[in-house]
Amino acid sequence: MTELVLLATVVALAWLWWDSMQAREAAVTAARAACEAEGLQFLDDTVGIASLRPARNAGGRLLLQRAYDFEFSDTGDNRIRGSVVTLGRRVILLRVLPPQPVATVTRIR
């Protein structure tokens, strides 16, 4: 019986690892495409996991929702954080927003 539980645990962990690699690849592809479309540089060519939680899709099926962070640059001299959220292996949210210029405040005496 112990061997069966151990085998089931190993199979579950292997599935989680494989599913996570598929979702991560979808996130990298989406982030790279979004950066190219906006004329931005996708830095380090990778994403990092920020969160993992169970969530339901539109059909009510329970899947893993993963949030990934990545960095991009609009000038080549800075790093700006973007994010990708996947539900299962499908990208459901992508955020790539370069920073807005800061308005200069002039003090009048």
Image: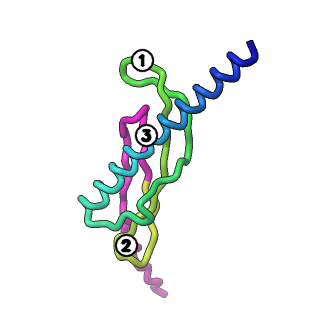
In which quadrant of the rendered view does residue 3 lie? top right
C-alpha gap between disc 1 and disc 2: 42 Å
Q: Residue at x 44, y 79 (%)?
A: 105
Q: Residue 102 location, x and y as percent?
A: 41, 73
Q: Are marks 1 and 2 in contact (CB under 8 Å)?
A: no
Identity, as a three-letter code, of the amino acid under mark 3: Ala
Span of residues in magenta:
83-109
Q: Name the residue at 31% across, 66% down.
A: 40
Distance CA(mark 3)–CA(mark 1): 19 Å
Secondary structure beneath label 3? helix
Q: Residues within 10 Å of mark 2 (few under 14, many from 20)?
A: few
- Horizontally, residue 52 falls left or right of residue 90, namely right
Q: Which residue is disc 2 drawn over?
A: 101
Q: Residues within 10 Å of mark 1 (few under 14, many from 20)?
A: few
On the image, numbered disc 1 is attached to which residue? 60
- Mark 3 and mark 1 lie on one chain; the one further toward the N terminus is 3
Q: Would residue 105 be counted in the magenta stretch? A: yes
Q: Amino acid at mark 2?
A: Pro
Q: Observer-nearest residue: 81 or 109? A: 81
List x then y, in percent, for residue 58: 37, 22
* Residue depicted at x 43% and y 19%: 61
Comparing marks 1 and 2, which lies closer to the viewer?
Answer: 1
User: Is 77 part of what is drawn in magenta?
Assistant: no
* Badge 2 or badge 3: first in the primary sequence: 3
> What residue did someone put label 3 on?
23
